[in-house]
Image (tube, rainbow, N blue to C red):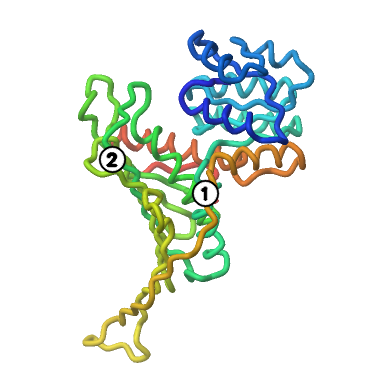
Amino acid sequence: MGAGGWGKNHVRNYAAIPDADLRYICDRHEGIRESMAALYPSVDVVSDLPVILEDPAVAAIVVATHAPSHFEVAEAALRAGRDVFVEKPLCLSGDQAATLCGLAEESGRILMVGHLLLYHPAVERLKGLIADGELGDVLYIYAQRVNLGVVRREENAWWSLAPHDISVANYLLGSSPKAVSATGSCYLQPERGIEDVVFATLHYPDGRMAHLHVSWLDPHKTRKLTVVGDRKMAVFDDTSADQKLAVFDKGVEPPATLSYEEGVRIRTGDILIPALKMAEPLRRECLAFLEAVRTRKAPVADGASGLHVVRALEGGSASLAQGGARIELPGGR
């Protein structure tokens, strides 16, 4: 569902995966349907979802339409007994996200969300380093996702860019935030109230936090996330061609006998660049969805993960409207 924009990349991948049988491509725009029909002549190209849901051979639906329609399409597919993948964000409100999770659980269906970076080899390796205790106890995370463009008219930079880093922070910390505070400004489209830049802090139940900076009005293209542990620190830089992940043997240690003159002791060691077997994150995400459909086991980016991200986004929007007020979130764990 939805073959324009990012949706065409889903089509490309499922058409190329031997274990996938791509039966339909659905889009309401005639021009997109024509281009898809020319590229994939063996696939039925249609304009309406009911045509697909009436076919009992269809086991799963990929929803890559614009975000305001995610809930409607995913709900229809789940009620029709199909497994569903929904691009991020899962939907535009916590209540809607909870409804979809409830429907999936009640019907025994798979619900997966397009938190693409959870399937990035560098993020997967970083999760392993944290699980193995390589970084020690993780203290905090901060991320920058900035660029000059693409400026959107339907959603602000927070909803457009932050889902990536919220999902990664939740994944790495193994938790979801209990509160969020955010500030931002509307410079390019003040009449529409669309924030171009947002600074936000997510507060987790155990005292850890994640700080996010998202913007489409910036001179740099930066996609970087830093994890600070009490033993080591790590940086995931998605714009780097050959150093996606770096581990810094740096930290601060109190001396055995603390005095005013000594303070704390700074420890600086080696920088390790782990060898990564790179693969397209979207291909790995598509394979993970197929695996979930086949095994009936919940994927890493399951409906619950999507729900927690939507609640953080929704809380961030409320904080923006209230000038940066701290907003408590339901379900923080």
In the image, residue 333 above or below residue 116: below
Based on the displayed image, in which of its 4 quarters is residue 218 positioned? top left
Q: What's the amino acid at mark 1?
A: His
Q: Position of residue 284 (x, y in %)?
A: 59, 44
Residue under label 2: 183
Q: Is residue 140 visible?
A: no
Question: Which residue does the image show at 79% across and 19% down from the upper left?
Answer: 56
User: Is 306 on the left or on the right of 225, as rendered?
Assistant: right
> Which mark, residue 120?
1
Numbered disc 1: secondary structure: loop
Question: Which residue does the image show at 37% across and 78% down from the upper left?
Answer: 269
Instruction: Measure the C-alpha gap from mark 1 to mark 2.
Output: 29 Å
Badge 1 crowding class, 10 Å Cα cut-off, few under 14, some 14 to 19, many 20 or more, is many
Q: Is residue 117 visible?
A: yes
Question: Which residue does the image show at 47% across and 42% down from the upper left?
Answer: 329
> Which mark, residue 172?
none
Question: Which residue does the image show at 68% across and 29% down from the upper left?
Answer: 103
User: Is 284 on the left or on the right of 207, as rendered?
Assistant: right
Residues marked 1 and 2 touching at CB (< 8 Å) = no
Q: Position of residue 68 (x, y in %)?
A: 48, 21
Mark earlier in primary sequence (1, 2): 1
